[in-house]
Image (cartoon, rainbow, N blue to C red):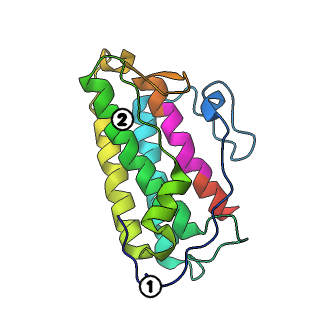
Amino acid sequence: MSDATSPDRPPPPPAQADDKDWTWVLEQPCPECKAEVGGLSVDDVADKNREVATAFANLLRTRPDVADRPVADVWSPLEYGAHVLDVFRLFLTRLELMLAEDDPMFANWDPNETAEADRYDLMDPTQVADDLEAAAAALASRFEGLTPNQLERTGRRSDGAVFSVLSFARYEIHDPIHHLWDVTR
């Protein structure tokens, strides 16, 4: 996914590892970003995905310091935007897996590893913005097309967390909301 403009530039230091189990956001508001996702419908999630993508894309297209890290081990707005793009893509892939298979196990994903391998820090902010809006729209459209029976299908992570399609959608939207808060607070 990388659109590197200076591939010879050394990579930045790794970002702080996030090893929290964020599934608790399904039960209570996030104390940091204040998102309350536990009662959202899939249509609400679809709308919020589009809203957050638009806000993130506008930030990526207009913020002059978009590639600057606030501190060495915290992602820049560009890196957060590339991560959110990958979240939209990954969750669409996992959603399709949940709809096609009975109770699939999701492959593990290390966002920091992906950020380093894909060189999020070197990506073109405008391209990330365009791709982010397209990926959010694709995921939102898929959420909007789900039937009530599909909302009950399940999938699980290797750590034992089990999601219905509905809880999966609610869990998904917290990540983009939280990362937009990360770069605008």
* 130 sits to left or right of 6: left
Residue 174 colored in magenta in the image: yes
Give the labeled residue for mark 1.
6
Residue ID at (45%, 36%): 44
Q: Is residue 147 above or below residue 170?
A: above
Give the labeled residue for mark 2.
94
Residue 38 colored in magenta in the image: no
Residue ID at (34%, 43%): 139
Mark 1 neighbour class, 10 Å CA radius: few under 14, some 14 to 19, many 20 or more: few
On the image, the x and y values in percent for residue 171 come to 53, 34
Depth check, mark 2 against mark 1: the one in front is 1
Which quarter of the figure is the N terminus placed in?
bottom left
Separation of residues labelled 2 and 1 (CA atoms): 32 Å
- Answer with the quarter of the image where residue 77 lies: bottom right
Which quarter of the figure is the C terminus placed in?
bottom right
Closer-to-camera residue (171/37): 171
Q: Is residue 40 above or below residue 101?
A: below
- Answer with the quarter of the image where residue 98 lies: top left
Residue ID at (51%, 78%): 62
- Kind of element beneath mark 1: loop
- Tell me whether circle 2 and circle 1 mark residues in contact (CB < 8 Å): no
Q: Is residue 158 above or below residue 19?
A: above
| Bounds of the magenta segment | 170-178
Q: Residue type at mark 2: give it.
A: Arg
Q: Residue type at mark 1: give it.
A: Ser
Helix, strand or loop for the magenta stretch, by majority: helix
Q: Residue furthest left?
A: 100
